[in-house]
Amino acid sequence: LPCVREKLLSLQRDLAASNDVVMDGRDIGTNILPSAELKVYLTASSAVRAKRRYDELVAKGVENIDIEKIEQDIIEQIKTDIIARDKQDMERKTAPLKRADDAVLIDSSDMTIEQVTDTIVGLARERM
């Protein structure tokens, strides 16, 4: 809802104006904090994102499936949902999802969480 997004925008900008922050979101670098010192556009293939989401659900006990075929069906559905969400976010009128021109692109498809973290921390240290 645009009215909710507008309220959040002012709260997030106020927070960043008075504190050093790390923010995560689909429009932080383009809409919320367009003059941020470091912007990272973190992405991964929809297939990798679906598998990661499935693994999160299994770890939380939401899905407890050992049969590979059923696992693949669930991953395909999650992948479809991810693609649909990305499309919806990219096409919305208010603060659409897009990479900021000055954002560093990191494709984490073939990276571990530690590699992603090390890469982002390294980028931040370069700017200090």
Image (cartoon, rainbow, N blue to C red):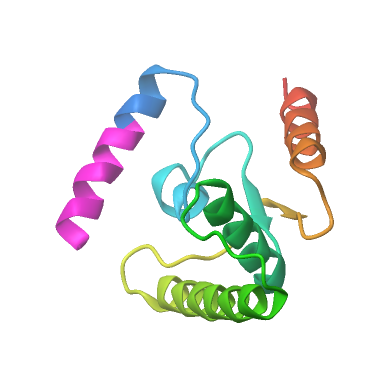
Residue 110: where, in percent of width, then height? 84, 57
Residue 123: where, in percent of width, then height? 77, 34
Q: Is residue 114 above or below residue 90?
A: above
Q: Is residue 78 visible?
A: yes
Residue 68 versus residue 52: which sits nearer the camera?
Answer: 68
Q: Quadrant of residue 67?
A: bottom right
Q: Is residue 106 above or below residue 122?
A: below
Looking at the image, which residue is at 51% across and 60% down?
63
Looking at the image, which residue is at 80% across and 32% down?
118
Q: Is residue 102 visible?
A: no
Q: Is residue 17 left or right of residue 54?
A: left
Q: Quadrant of residue 107?
A: bottom right
Looking at the image, which residue is at 61% across and 78% down?
70
Q: Is residue 92 left or right of residue 72?
A: left
Task: Specify the segment rendered in magenta.
Answer: 1-13
**Residue 104 lies within the magenta run:** no
Residue 38: where, in percent of width, then height? 64, 37
Indicate the quadrant containing the C terminus: top left, top right, bottom left or bottom right. Answer: top right
Residue 92 versus residue 88: which sits nearer the camera?
Answer: 88
Indicate the quadrant containing the N terminus: top left, top right, bottom left or bottom right. Answer: bottom left
Q: Is residue 71 left or right of residue 121?
A: left
Specify the farthest residue to the front: 66
Specify the farthest residue to the left: 3
User: Magenta region, mostly helix, strand or loop?
Assistant: helix
Looking at the image, which residue is at 58% across and 76% down?
79
How many numbered discs sit on the rendered protein? 0
Residue 119 versus residue 27: which sits nearer the camera?
Answer: 119
